[in-house]
Amino acid sequence: MSSFEVYDPDFSRYVMGNAPVKQLATGFDWVEGPVWFGDAGCLLFSDIPNNKILRFVPGQGISTYRAPSNYSNGHTRDRQGRLVSCEHGLRRVTRTEYDGAITIIADSYQGKPLNSPNDVVVHSDGSIWFTDPHYGIMTNYEGFAAEQELPCNVYRVDPNGGIAAVLTDFNCPNGLAFSPDETLLYVADTGRMFHPDPQHIRVFSMASGRPTGGEVFHTITPGCADGIRCDSDGNLWSSARDGVHCIAPDGHLMGKILVPETVSNLCFGGRAKHQLFITATTSLYAITLNRAGVQKP
Ligand code: MG
């Protein structure tokens, strides 16, 4: 049976008391970046320190999708269904083509190497948005220790290839997500992890086509918003140290799904996009919800 904490009675509409948080696989070192492929009936996710992208097939288990993965972290799919990946090791964002070839989407800005792209989303206009904190170059654990040459920015890569730093006032931008209608952009700031730095999610208006505003939407406690995704009602589901937090569109905490390990990232998937896949430290978990997530295509 699952453990929930309810802060708003509306949360009970989203969870089902008899749906368990299931541990699907364990024994990894630090997993992140889940992305669902309904067409292939599988989930891909990263075990960053072990330099692998893993594949989970319901009913079959775990296999290796790509190794080495260049210490990949976050993944998503573009509007054509192709895998888009952040790689700490080669400090780049890539796309995996239908034939398996790797295309570099971004690896530098103004002539300097990116830090270590962390998480990525694709807008319906085809632009690719990613965060570039320094975590992957701090040590040799999740990549290769290196000098940081750029601030920790959020970038937008135009469908025509141009790259722009669109958000430049973050400490360490991490998870990001568009609202279902793409009128809002949420970006988490997870700071330097070891200092009393920001652990919050900011919200930007996309009314002008570019992010404006940026006030604090919600502060995560305990832990941080390493990964965030919206459901079809516009609620934001965030990682936290104690599990997954569900945050209403007005920013208040509706409830928590308690998970036995620190959660890093999450994504919706499954037959009706109503399964929440959760990467948490050494394990992959899932819980079936009473709402579908926004995961395009
Ligand atoms: Mg992250």
Image (tube, grey):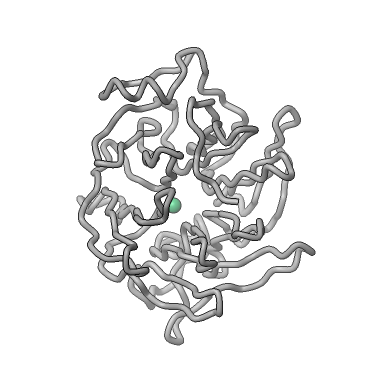
Residue furthest to the bottom: 111
Determine the residue positioned at 44% across, 26% down. 260
Return the x and y of residue 249 as percentages of the image width and height.
30, 41
How many callouts does the rendering have?
Answer: 0
Q: Is residue 201 left or right of residue 40?
A: left
Q: Quadrant of residue 242?
A: top left
Determine the residue positioned at 72% across, 45% down. 39
Determine the residue positioned at 38% across, 73% down. 148
Return the x and y of residue 31 as percentages of the image width and height.
53, 44
**In the rendered image, the vertical position of residue 218 relative to residue 169, given as above or below:** above
Return the x and y of residue 5 as percentages of the image width and height.
32, 21
Residue furthest to the right: 99
**In the rendered image, the vertical position of residue 89 relative to residue 224, given as above or below:** below
Q: Nearer the viewer, residue 18 or 233?
A: 233
Return the x and y of residue 171 as percentages of the image width and height.
27, 62
**In the rendered image, the vertical position of residue 277 relative to residue 5, given as above or below:** below
Question: Can see residue 63?
Answer: yes
Question: Can see residue 177?
Answer: no
Determine the residue positioned at 55% across, 63% down. 87
Q: Is residue 105 left or right of residue 173?
A: right
Q: Nearer the viewer, residue 102 or 271?
A: 271
Q: Nearer the viewer, residue 148 or 72?
A: 72
Q: Quadrant of residue 7?
A: top left
